[in-house]
Image: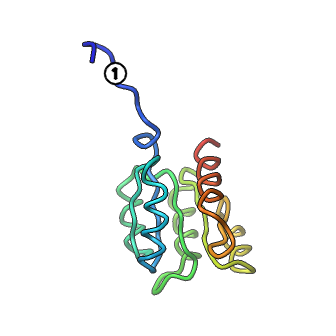
Amino acid sequence: MVPGLCPLISPKSMFTILVVDDKETILDIITGFLEDKYSVIAVTTAMDALDVINRGGVDLLITDLGLDIMSGWDLIERVREKHGDRIKILAMSAGGPALEYAMKLGADDYFLKAHSSMDMLLEKVSRLLTV
């Protein structure tokens, strides 16, 4: 590297995505798919997600809605109350009224787990991070 010049910053180092799902297999699939392009943090509870978010640096939250103890809906509400629109939120569920309610609470978009491809997830993530 030439002295005085900064290295190029890759998209992976520019954005941090927090993925929350209580199913380890879902976390592994999503994390594995996104980690080539982004910095990804994976947790299994909403409380752990809040801890990570409160430390700062999260650009996008991808959360399952059907989490144990504290639901994804509660997580969306708390993030919006404390952080406003600074953090983009992508809600995940099997579909139906659950996602509609998540959008009313402040989710920016949603992902249908059973009916969407990983390419569609990547498209939604890219769009949310460039808005």
Q: Residue at x 36, y 66 (%)?
A: 51
Q: Residue 113 versus residue 85: which sits nearer the camera?
A: 113
Q: Quadrant of residue 73?
A: bottom right
The quarter of the image holding the N terminus is top left
Residue, disc 1? 6
Task: Report whether 86 appears left or right of 12.
Answer: right
Residue 2: x %, y % from top left:
27, 13
Q: Judge whether 12 appears above or below 119 on screen.
A: above
Q: Residue 7 versus residue 73: which sits nearer the camera?
A: 7
Q: Residue at x 45, y 80 (%)?
A: 23
- For the image, the number of numbered tags is 1
Residue 77: x %, y % from top left:
58, 70
Q: Judge whether 27 appears above or below 15 on screen.
A: below
Residue at the extreme bottom: 69
The quarter of the image holding the C terminus is top right
Task: Report whether 12 appears left or right of 118.
Answer: left
Task: Report whether 31 appears left or right of 100.
Answer: left
Tell me the element at label 1. loop
